[in-house]
Image (cartoon, rainbow, N blue to C red):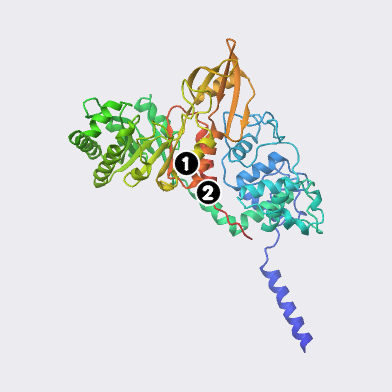
Amino acid sequence: MKKIILLMLIGTLLFSYTTTRQEPASAATLPYHDISTSYAREAISRLHAGGIMQGTTTTAFSPKRSVTRAEFITVLMRALGITPASSAIPAYTDVPRSTWYYGAIQAATELGLTSGLGNGTFQPDQVLTRQEAAVWLTKALKQDIPTASSLSAYRDTSSIAAWAKPYVAAISTLGLMQGSEGRFYPLQSITRQETAVIFDRLLEDTRWKNKLTANAESTTSTAIHIGWQYGQSTEAYQRSVLQSNINVLSPRWYFLESTGQISDSTVPSLNTWAKANGKQVWAMVGNRFDQKATHQMLASDSLSSTAIQSIKSYVQKYNLAGINLDFENVHASDRDLFTSFIAKLAEELHNAEAVLSVDLPPDLGSDWSAAYNYAELAKHADYLVIMAYDEHWTGYKAGSVASLNWVEQHLDKLLPQVPADQLILGMPLYTRDWAINAQGATLSSEDLSLPEQNKRVQAAGSSLKWNSAASQYTTEYWKANTKHRIWLEDARSLSAKLQLGTNLGLAGYAYWHIGGESSDIWASLRNAEKYGNYRFDRSK
């Protein structure tokens, strides 16, 4: 009787499995003629339907062929919902812009997922090994890197490269890649059908599927993106904004005059245009670096009160969403007066339901920043916009405008004083061309827009070197027997800064200035923001 019951139970379970499992697609419905006998045919079909992985031709998938580095990184970028980057500055000498994989490799590089194989090369057509795939996948999913001791279960652990062991351990723990017969086979090339199975597992796993889907469906940025107007007509500024990620316009409409009054140069049509295009206007109020006029206004109760009421009246008259106050070169002795002014201005603007953002230099420990009490200002203003550039300025020692390590250092200094969600990171859409002598001393410098920078780099034909600490390319060229050096700002360097801000939970970004950018940066910055906002589970 027990045997009969057991056989009936087994029969029931087998019947249940065969009637509920997904039947393999018929050969007639498969997207490629050569996958009907592949163990990965279902995965290949799903990835094909989702536009994640394509065949080697329109009719063939070549499932047993080894996957190349270019193919794998392209599939990885598609799986993450990352847009191909049309970067003006190529990261590698062996990845020309004309290749089909240029955009994917550039995007992955800008996100910090790969830096190639050294000497400025990527070797896109080289087959990918299993241990290399483990590294890319683990990095892409932002996993904690364990110690290599967890690899003891693999009989070929000694064959895994030291740099790959922690990543192989992580990817094995996740269950995305596993060996067979107790081995991982780290140096074995990974096939296209193996690649399909791995990415199908990834995209069907709830640890990542829901987050990837939600982010892919989101079309608007949750961060603030301020675009300062400078040197452009209203019409040119509008055209630039439409091609950008800007959601807050900051035109230069109001200035503190020597009389203590706030002048009005409002262009009402721009505010109307901004609202019609789903954007806000936080008009700039500047002081033209006039320390004397600023002191006179701050020190006078009547002048400061009049200035505050003038700013408020402009907000109400033109129905502005906010104000961006840019008072620079304020004397250190006016520190308390400036803080009091911001407190009173914030109160009036908040009564008018308007936002107050205040532009500030980083806390440099010098007279240039001594007038700003960051912690106290954050208690009143809605946002502090940190102008994290001019690390090296005209006439100073040659160097970067905004190296990543310098930017990070100053954000780390400010975060104990100011909540991250009140900080907006100012980023440069310019750089400098430095002329230097044989001893390395500065002879002169010239501000460059990013298109002009790119033009000079291309004309010079000189090699680019990536500085990982600064997250910037550097290059040198000769002109009229004088050496020139440039620390580049481009899609890759700006993406690194934006990712830093996203990781720190900053409120947003501001760009000095609109019109200085090259058009390719915006898609890269959207990628950086999207990827930066991914928060993947770190456990199986």
State the residue lying farthest toward the left: 302
Q: Amino acid at mark 1?
A: Leu
**Relative to the observer, which residue lies in front, 3 or 127?**
127
Would you identify the image quadrant in which residue 9 lies? bottom right
Point out the tag, 2 or 1, that comes first from the N-terminus: 2
- For the question of whether residue 28 can be seen, the reply is no
Tag 1, which secondary structure? helix
Task: Work out which quarter of the rendered image holds the C terminus and state it.
Answer: bottom right
Q: Position of residue 191 (x, y in %)?
A: 76, 47
From the viewer's perspective, is residue 421 above or below residue 291?
below
Which residue is at a point 62% across and 38% down the rendered structure image?
A: 109
State the residue lying farthest toward the front: 333
Task: Work out which quarter of the rendered image holds the N terminus and state it.
Answer: bottom right
Q: Is residue 371 left or right of residue 300?
A: right
Pointer 1: what residue?
A: 411
The Cα–Cα distance between marks 2 and 1, rounded to whole angstroms, is 29 Å
Tag 2, which secondary structure? helix
Q: Amino acid at mark 2?
A: Ala
Q: Position of residue 123 (x, y in %)?
A: 72, 34
Checking the image for residue 216, the label placed there is 2
**Relative to the observer, which residue lies in front, 148 or 371?**
371
Q: Position of residue 195 (x, y in %)?
A: 71, 49
Checking the image for residue 238, the label placed there is none
